[in-house]
Image (cartoon, rainbow, N blue to C red):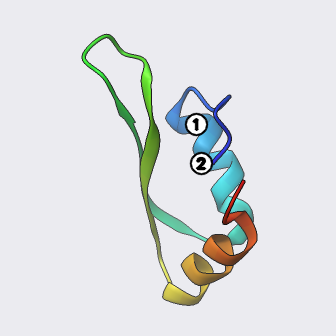
Amino acid sequence: MQLSLTSDLQLRNVMEVYGPLLYVSLARHQSGLPKGFAFVEFKRSHHAEEALFSLNGQ
């Protein structure tokens, strides 16, 4: 995941390219700064697999 992503909306825009989303949440510290990981749920599992394959290591 790009470290420059700072909002759920930015993350949603990156991930929805791979398919319909049910849930997006960027994990944050109490200070509000991103922790560097997020939770993303796709409507269909094959969309999640495509995103994982395409974005792995980025």
The residue most toward the left is: 30
- In this view, the residue in front, 43 or 3, is 3
Decide if residue 12 is on the left or right side of residue 23.
Answer: right
Q: Look at the picture and state if 1 lies above or below 15.
A: above
Find disc 1 in the rendering and name its residue.
9
Residue positioned most to the top: 31
Amino acid at pointer 2: Arg
**Quarter of the image where one finds residue 39:** bottom left
In the rendering, which numbered label is found on residue 32? none
Q: Name which residue lies at 64% across and 36% down.
A: 10
Of helix, strand and loop, which one carries label 1? Answer: helix
Badge 2 density bin: few <14, some 14–19, many ≥20, Cα 10 Å? some
Q: Position of residue 48 (x, y in %)?
A: 55, 77
Element assignment for label 2 = helix
Residue 43, how many percent across, how many down?
47, 77
**Residue 50 image offset from top left, x and y in percent:** 67, 80
User: How many numbered callouts?
Assistant: 2
Q: Quadrant of residue 37?
A: top left
Q: Position of residue 25 (x, y in %)?
A: 40, 44
Give the labeled residue for mark 2. 12
Determine whether 55 is above or below 42 in the image: above
As displayed, is residue 23 above or below residue 32?
below
Q: Quadrant of residue 31?
A: top left
Q: Say whether marks 1 and 2 touch (CB < 8 Å).
A: yes
Q: 33 or 11: nearer the eye?
A: 33
Residue neighbourhood size for the residue with mark 1, other residues' Cα within 10 Å, grouped as few (<14), some (14–19), many (≥20)? few
Question: What's the residue type where badge 1 is placed?
Answer: Leu
